Amino acid sequence: MVAPFDATEFRRTLGHLPTGVTVITARGQFGRPVGMACNSFMSVSLDPPLIMLCVGNASSTLIDLRQSGTFCVNILANGQERLCRQFSVKDIDRFAGVRWAESPTGPELSDVVAWISCSIDTEHIAGDHVIIIARVTGLRVNQEEPAPLVFHRGRFGAFRDNEDLLPTARSLSEPPDSAFASATSPISSAVGRIWLNRT
C-alpha cells in the first residue's frame, strides 16, 4: 500500500478500473440542448429503478441538470471516442455536427448503445463532486446492438470476449450477468487521454 498518497496517485490507481462511457444530455436555459461526458455512472436499484452519476460541483452542466430535473443517459458505442471528447471540452457548441433526436428528458444521440430517460430524485455532496440519484422513467436499446465504448487508464477501448473463461465462470454457478463480467478480457486500448465528469 502507498500511504500517504496524493491526488495524482489516487487518480492513476482508480484509472485501472475499466468503465463504460456515457453522455448525459438535457434541455438547458431557453430550451437549448446541453450535455457532458460521464463515466461515473452505475445502476443503484431495481425496485424502484434508480441510477447514479457523479458530476463535478463546478460543472456548468450541473446547473442545467438541476434546472431541468430530467436528463437522458446516452451509452456510447465503440468508435464514438470523438463524440466523448467533444462533450468533454468547455466553452464550445458540443452539439455541433452531432446527430440527435428529441426526447422528453433530453436529446438522444444517434448510434449509441442505449438511451435511458431519468428524473432526478436526490443529490448528495461528496467532496468536489455531486452524486445524483435519479429514477429511470424509460429506456431503449439500439436494435443493432453495437459494442460499448470502454474507458481505461485515460484511454478508450472495447470489450473482447474470452470464450475460454465462459465454462469456468458457469461452473461456479454465477448469475448470467456476473458470468459475462468475468468472461470479458481487458480492453484493447486506443490513444487519447481525457477528463470526464467535470464539464
Image: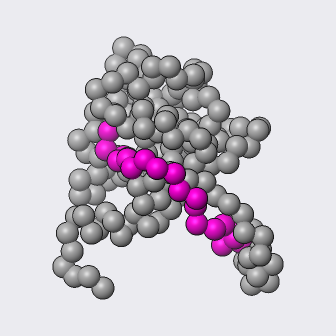
Q: On screen, 168 above or below 18?
A: below
Q: Position of residue 22 (x, y in %)?
A: 51, 43
Q: Residue at x 35, y 47 (%)?
A: 195
Residue at 60% x, 54% y is: 158
Q: Please give the range of residues in magenta.
A: 179-199
Query: In this view of the protein, which residue sits in the foreground, 4 or 24?
Result: 4
| Res. 70 in view | no
Tell which of 127 and 171 is nearer to you.
171
Compared with 127, 72 (above or below) is above
Residue 92 visible to the viewer: yes
Q: Residue furthest top?
A: 30
Query: In x, y percent, where is residue 98?
Result: 52, 23
Nearest the viewer among 164 and 55 is: 164
Q: Is residue 102 left or right of residue 61?
A: right
Q: Which residue is farthest front?
A: 191
- Whole-percent x and y of residue 175? 73, 72
User: Residue 55's spot in the image, x, y percent?
Assistant: 34, 46
Per the picture, the main secondary structure of the magenta-coloured stretch is loop
Residue 188 is drawn in which quadrant? bottom right
Q: Is residue 194 magenta?
A: yes
In the rendered image, the quadrant that contains the N terminus is bottom left
Depth order, front residue of 6/118: 6
Please, is residue 57 above or below residue 128 in the view?
above
Q: Is residue 128 magenta?
A: no
Left or right, 176 with reference to 9: right
Q: Residue at x 27, y 69 (%)?
A: 9
